[in-house]
Image (tube, rainbow, N blue to C red):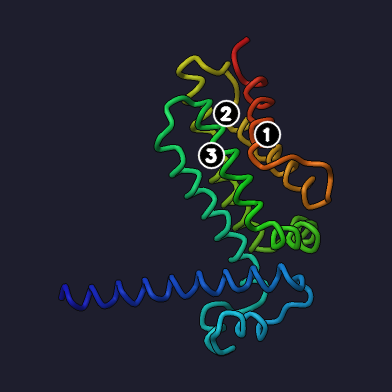
Amino acid sequence: MDKKKSNIERIKEIKSRRRSEILQAARKVIAEVGFSKVSMDMVAKKAKISKGALYLYFSSKDELFYSAIEEAFDNLKERAFKSLKTSDSSAEKIGKIILAHLKDTEKYQDFLKVFFVEKMWEIMTSENPSYAKLRETRISYENFIAEIIKEGCERGNFRKMDEKKAAFVLVEMIKSSFISKILNFPCGETSIDADFLKECFLKGISKC
């Protein structure tokens, strides 16, 4: 029984790893040619699998695209969470989240540029179920940040506020910083931008 269970878990692990490799390949191809020009054949070739095998994981180009975005967000949240293990103060945690977020958006910059330029408005003005899923992912991330802000309020470091609204504002600040980069507005190094965002945000929520 244990051996059978072990085999099932190993198969799941292999499939999960293969799925991530496909999504990584998809992000690279989409970043290179854009969503409108990319094809499932191109992704399959980049991932070094057959087109038929690709369809075992994803039924369409849209599903593949949104899954690639969702995984990027999940990776961001996981790295942000890990960075907090050595942090004590709520302010320090906020700073580490900002830096981790900016570093991740920089890592996926070309792919995310395609999302904002080609797909963002489309999915926000439709009843696309993939957008609903992405929205849930973002809300989960904001709630993660809101808990840290709440912690700071309870410790007396931050003034009393709606922590969920504050988390929303912080994510929008980070997003605006990233969009400025992809639009080629004057920006500093990632660490400098992160420090600036941290300073601006903390000044707004800290006790006077």
> Which residue is drawn at the image coordinates 66% and 42% (left, top)?
190
Label for residue 70?
Answer: none
Label for residue 143?
Answer: 3
Q: Height in image: 55 above or below 207?
A: below
User: On the rendered image, what quadrant is the N terminus found in?
Assistant: bottom left
> Which residue is drawn at the image coordinates 63% and 80% (left, top)?
43
User: On the rendered image, what quadrant is the C terminus found in?
Assistant: top right
Q: What distance separates the C-alpha of mark 1 from that of mark 2? A: 10 Å
Q: Secondary structure at mark 1?
A: helix
Label for residue 169?
Answer: 1
Which label's residue is closer to the chain start, 1 or 2?
2
Q: Height in image: 35 above or below 53?
A: above
Q: Secondary structure at mark 3?
A: helix
Q: Residues within 10 Å of mark 3 (few under 14, many from 20)?
A: some
> Which residue is drawn at the image coordinates 73% and 77% (left, top)?
38
Q: What distance separates the C-alpha of mark 3 from that of mark 2? A: 9 Å
Q: Height in image: 35 above or below 143?
A: below
Taking the view exactly as shown, the residue that stands out farthest to the left is 1
Residue 118: x and y in percent read 80, 63
In front of the other: 142 or 97: 97
Name the amino acid, label 3: Asn
Q: Which residue is mark 2?
A: 163
Residue 45 in which image quadrant: bottom right
